[in-house]
Image (spheres, grey):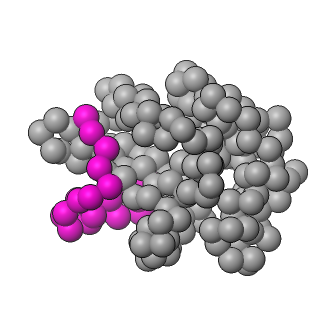
Amino acid sequence: MKLSKIYSIEILNKIEKLYYNSFPNNERKPFKLILDKCKQNKMELIAITGDSDEFLGLAITILYEDIVILDYFAISPNYRGKNIGSEALQKIFNLYEDKRLLLEIEDPDVVSENQAERIRRKSFYLKNNMTVMPYKISLFDIQMEVLTYNCFVSFEDYHSVFENVFDKSVSDKVKLI
């Protein structure tokens, strides 16, 4: 398995399709915004491919100073349940080993129709040695937990990413609960 930031149009199309199929509309950024932020070196779009170059999944990160937010992470449906997600996540940890890496997940304590999925997602990240931060956030009115890998990230540091990578209309919608 390998992570690649350079890819063909074919792989870019697969990334975009998986992105739109894996994340609900209310949690997605416009794909064009992601591409624009990649050109500004404020985000990275990563293709996860197998040893035979088959497309396995995607990772989209936000970068600011020593902080990396794993904003989106998805494995193609045909490859789920085969430990590929854990292996890819370890490679992402290694890729950003000199940074403080974090991600947000929908709070599994909030009653919802996808609560079982939220619980499984949190269990997956905890199994992969991530730690829940001692605060919750409202991210565009969605209650989220913040998980980190081998580090502590305060809410202020977390929020500074949004203040510096996106405009005020975005950072104003990221709040401490």
The answer to whether one can see residue 89 in this image is no
Left or right side of 60 for 84 = left
| Residue drawn at (76%, 58%) of the image | 159
| Residue drawn at (27%, 39%) of the image | 2
Check the image and name the residue furthest to the left. Answer: 52
Q: Is 132 placed above or below 16 here?
A: above
The answer to whether one can see residue 131 in this image is yes
Secondary structure predominantly adopted by residues drawn in magenta: helix
Q: Is 49 placed above or below 123 here?
A: below
- Magenta span of residues: 1-22
Q: Position of residue 102 (x, y in %)?
A: 62, 42
Left or right side of 90 for 122 = right
| Residue drawn at (82%, 53%) of the image | 156
Left or right side of 27 for 11 = left
Between residues 114 and 100, which one lies in front from this camera angle?
A: 100
Picture quadrant where residue 126 is located: top right
Check the image and name the residue furthest to the right. Answer: 177
| Residue drawn at (49%, 62%) of the image | 43
Q: Quadrant of the N terminus?
A: top left
Q: Is residue 11 magenta?
A: yes
Left or right side of 172 for 89 = left
Q: Position of residue 163 (x, y in %)?
A: 73, 68
Q: Is residue 60 magenta?
A: no
Q: Position of residue 86 (x, y in %)?
A: 42, 28
Q: Position of residue 146 (x, y in %)?
A: 70, 42
Between residues 140 and 2, which one lies in front from this camera angle?
A: 2
